[in-house]
Image (tube, helix red, strand yellow):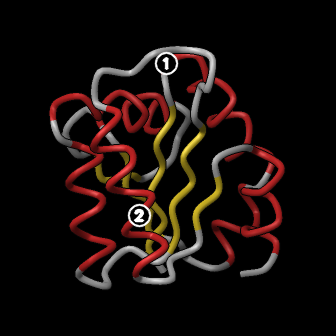
């Protein structure tokens, strides 16, 4: 199972904390992690094996959206910062839309992400 990780700048530490809290599940289920650029760097620094793609504003969100459309990515954990502006908002909306089109679970906060991870 492939899970994509995306976190806006103000949510990256929260993403790493979330992964640490659910490390056992991720390791038991042999989850493949992919992430947008900087999120991937933070996750890798925390000791996880992760494929880092481009940063979100440089096309990383679109790369993950393509993997969703191709049926490669099975779940997206996208810790969004709703109080900040993001210049790549069209890519974010495209990713969310493709998750809906292809029936791929999408969590935008730690509470919904925890429910998805525990359901694996």
Label 1 neighbour load within 10 Å: few <14, some 14-19, many 20+:
some
| 11 relative position to 96: left or right | right
Residue under circle 2?
A: 97
Q: Is residue 108 left or right of residue 46?
A: right
Residue in the foreground of this view, choosing between 82 and 21: 82
Q: The residue tagged with tag 1: helix, strand or loop?
A: helix
102 shown above or below 41: below
Residue 69 numbered mark, or none: none
Residue 98 lies, with reference to residue 29, above or below; the image says above
Q: How far across and how far down the image is residue 50, in percent?
A: 38, 52
Image position of 102 with respect to 86: above or below? below
**Residue 42: x and y, percent?**
47, 28
Q: Position of residue 44 (x, y in %)?
A: 43, 38
Q: Earlier in the sequence, mark 2 or mark 1?
A: 1
Write down the quadrant of residue 119 in the picture: bottom right
Q: Residues within 10 Å of mark 2 (few under 14, many from 20)?
A: some
* Mark 2 secondary-structure assignment: helix
Residue at image position (83%, 50%) is 111
As measured in the structure, the alpha-carbon distance from the residue carrying label 2 to the one carrying label 1 is 22 Å
Q: Find residue 73 and report its image quarter.
A: bottom left
Which of discs 2 and 1 lies nearer the camera? The answer is 2
Mark 1 highlights which residue? Answer: 9
Say which residue appears at 62% left-offset and 17% top-offset.
83
């Amino acid at each position: 199972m492939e899970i994509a990780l995306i976190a806006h700048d103000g949510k990256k530490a929260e993403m790493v904390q979330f992964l640490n809290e659910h490390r056992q599940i991720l390791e038991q289920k042999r989850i493949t992690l992919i992430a947008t650029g900087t999120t991937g760097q933070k996750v890798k620094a925390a000791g996880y094996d992760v494929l880092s793609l481009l940063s979100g504003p440089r096309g990383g969100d679109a790369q993950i959206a393509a993997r969703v459309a191709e049926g490669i990515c099975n779940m997206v954990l996208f810790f969004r910062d709703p109080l900040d502006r993001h210049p790549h908002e069209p890519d974010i909306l495209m990713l969310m839309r493709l998750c809906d089109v292809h029936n791929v679970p999408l969590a935008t906060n730690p509470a919904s992400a925890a429910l998805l991870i525990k359901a694996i």
